[in-house]
Image: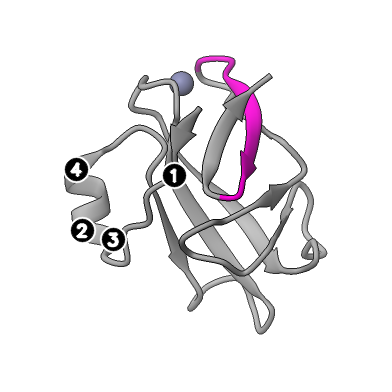
Amino acid sequence: MIRAIEFPDLVEFRRRQLPGSFHIDITQGGPKGAVFRFFCPCGCDAQSRLPIGLLEKPETAPSWSWNGKLSEPTLDPSVHQLNCGWHGWLRDGYWESV
Ligand SMILES: [Zn+2]
């Protein structure tokens, strides 16, 4: 399992490129939505962005429900990174591959 570390600052997030780290932008995605950016937990350096919603999936598809926590985030459903094929879950602040 890989710890998912939050970076509040987008510039710092992009500079460090830590596998499994993430940045949540609540200024995008509408009133109950946000954008979740993360570096692939496998270490391939791929950066992705997912539309997320607070405790519910946004209308847009594909999208993910977020538990609202920055230190122990959970996303539902699982995440499939198409660049490298990594597939797994973000649960309670940890990435678990399946
Ligand atoms: Zn990867």
Q: Position of residue 84 (x, y in %)?
A: 51, 15
First of labels 4, 3 by sequence position? 3
Say whether residue 54 is magenta: no
Query: As shown in the figure, which amino acid type bears the numbered disc 1?
Result: Ala
Callouts 2 and 1 close, C-beta under 8 Å: no
Q: Please tell me which residue is depicted at 56% across the width and 66% down the height of the picture.
A: 69
Mark 4: which secondary structure? helix
Span shown in magenta:
84-92
Disc 1 to disc 3, how far (Cα)?
Answer: 15 Å
Which of the labelled discs sits on residue 16, or is there none? Answer: 4
For mark 3, what is the residue?
10
Identify which residue is drawn at 69% across, 79% down.
32
Tag 2 near tag 3, CB within 8 Å: yes
Query: Quick check: 95 left or right of 57?
Result: left
What's the mark number on residue 11? 2
User: As drawn, which residue projects farthest toward the bottom?
Assistant: 31
Residue 4 image label: 1
* Viewer-nearest of discs 4 and 3: 4
Asked if labels 3 and 1 touch by Cβ distance under 8 angstroms, the answer is no
What separation in Å lies between label 2 and label 3 (alpha carbons)? 4 Å
Look at label 2 and name its amino acid: Val
Percent coordinates x, y for residue 26 in the rendering? 51, 75
Query: Which mark identifies residue 55?
Result: none
